[in-house]
């Protein structure tokens, strides 16, 4: 157990991850369509402020500003030649902030989906995906990330490619998927499917779970699906702060800090070991979550009725695992 995340997991019952990257950067002036990763080079002070916001709110783990840092994603901004540099910078700034925190804080090198469809459904081969993730992983490693953090994945093939890239880079990793389609990922993966997938990997993640998706209620239902299977690997819950609504020309998440505090406690009581937020989760939400986790004694495993009563109703009737699964609707969201 030489890595920082394993040490923290061994010493604590739960860890708090961070909140939204996109939401916070938009509040700092990032324009829709801009590549956030370019700010690692152009606005390092803003990226330090992003990271510090999470650390000061009590996060034990924060993700680097490198979600779209693969060549496939940076190509949209003609920056595909800067993968190594932008990922290294994102991790270096993180290392700086974590090392100044005065307590152990884990720098997690964020790796989002390539945005391309993998074979056999689409053109991206396994080897090409591994190579893209590996290039990104090497930059994050070079910058001092403690662990790679793969998130918002929907295809099992892409999850496997990321696992192999982490192995090639010699890095521990965490990997979460986005269950945004009536309890399943966009590619049809259920919570039970994911537990099976994780169990088959020869370089398994240190933790796995769900991020983003729809609201906190749906994410909680997915977490209950994971922990019902008693996986040996710790579970991550990183839900959005409510449901996105379009207000006055921008996306607003309706989840209050109080709601996210209730969500954090429910996630812990459902068996999640790493709890954070995704889109819409600000440092204010994180502070409320941290306080609730510290001050609320452990409770029984929550029921679906309790989750709906405390966090609001679900977006679909089933969690996607039964034969009564609803027809799949399509949504796409950035982590
Ligand atoms: Zn999100």
Image: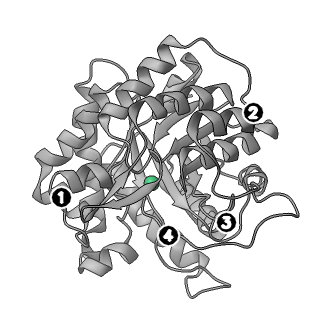
- Most foreground residue, 133 or 282: 282
**Horizontal and vertical percent position of residue 331:** 53, 70
Q: Is residue 159 above or below residue 254?
A: below
Q: Are marks 4 and 2 in contact (CB under 8 Å)?
A: no
Task: Name the element at disc 1.
Answer: helix
**Toward which corner of the image does residue 318 lie, by quadrant?**
bottom right
**Toward which corner of the image does residue 289 lie, by quadrant?**
top left
Q: Disc 4 marks which residue? A: 332
- Most foreground residue, 282 or 116: 282
Q: Nearer the viewer, mark 2 or mark 1?
A: 2
Q: Nearer the viewer, mark 4 or mark 2?
A: 2
**Horizontal and vertical percent position of residue 234:** 65, 35
Residues packed near mark 3 inside 10 Å, few (<14), some (14 to 19) or many (20 plus): some
Q: Disc 1 marks which residue? A: 39
Q: Is residue 37 above or below residue 63?
A: below
* CA distance separating discs 3 and 4: 17 Å
Mark seen at residue 224: none
Mark seen at residue 303: 2
Kindly tell me whether residue 39 is visible in this rendering.
yes
**x 25%, y 78%: residue:** 77
Q: Earlier in the sequence, mark 4 or mark 1?
A: 1
Task: Name the element at disc 3.
Answer: helix
Q: Earlier in the sequence, mark 4 or mark 2?
A: 2
**Quarter containing the C terminus:** bottom left
Q: Is residue 332 left or right of residue 217?
A: left
Q: Earlier in the sequence, mark 3 or mark 1?
A: 1
**x 26%, y 39%: residue:** 51
Q: Are marks 3 and 4 in contact (CB under 8 Å)?
A: no
Q: Disc 3 marks which residue? A: 156
């Amino acid at each position: 157990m030489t890595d920082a995340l394993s040490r923290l997991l061994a010493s604590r019952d739960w860890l708090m991850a961070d909140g939204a990257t996109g939401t916070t950067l938009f509040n700092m002036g990032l324009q829709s369509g801009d590549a956030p990763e370019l700010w690692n080079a152009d606005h390092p002070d803003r990226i330090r402020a992003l990271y510090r916001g999470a650390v000061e709110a009590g996060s034990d783990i924060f993700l680097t500003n490198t979600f779209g840092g693969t060549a496939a994603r940076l190509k949209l901004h003609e920056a595909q030649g800067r993968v190594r540099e932008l990922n290294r910078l994102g991790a270096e700034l993180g290392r700086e902030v974590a090392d100044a925190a005065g307590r152990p804080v884990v720098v997690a090198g964020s790796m989002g989906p390539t945005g391309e469809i993998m074979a056999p459904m689409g053109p991206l081969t396994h080897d090409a995906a591994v190579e893209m993730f590996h290039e990104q992983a090497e930059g994050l490693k070079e910058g001092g990330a403690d662990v790679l953090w793969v998130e918002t994945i929907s295809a099992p093939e892409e999850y496997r490619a990321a696992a192999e890239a982490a192995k090639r880079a010699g890095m521990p990793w965490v990997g979460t998927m986005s269950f945004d389609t009536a309890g399943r990922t966009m590619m049809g993966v259920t919570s039970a499917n994911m537990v099976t997938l994780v169990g088959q990997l020869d370089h398994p993640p240190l933790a796995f779970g769900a991020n983003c998706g729809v609201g906190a209620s749906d994410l909680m239902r997915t977490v209950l699906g994971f922990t019902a299977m008693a996986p040996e690997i710790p579970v991550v819950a990183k839900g959005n702060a409510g449901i996105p609504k379009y207000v006055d020309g921008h996306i607003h998440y309706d989840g209050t800090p109080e709601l996210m505090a209730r969500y954090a406690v429910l996630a812990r009581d459902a068996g999640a070991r790493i709890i954070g937020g995704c889109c819409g989760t600000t440092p204010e939400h994180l502070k409320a979550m941290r306080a609730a986790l510290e001050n609320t004694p452990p409770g029984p495993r929550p029921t679906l009725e309790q989750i709906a009563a405390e966090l609001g109703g679900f977006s679909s009737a089933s969690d996607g695992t039964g034969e009564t699964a609803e027809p799949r609707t399509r949504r796409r969201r950035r982590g």
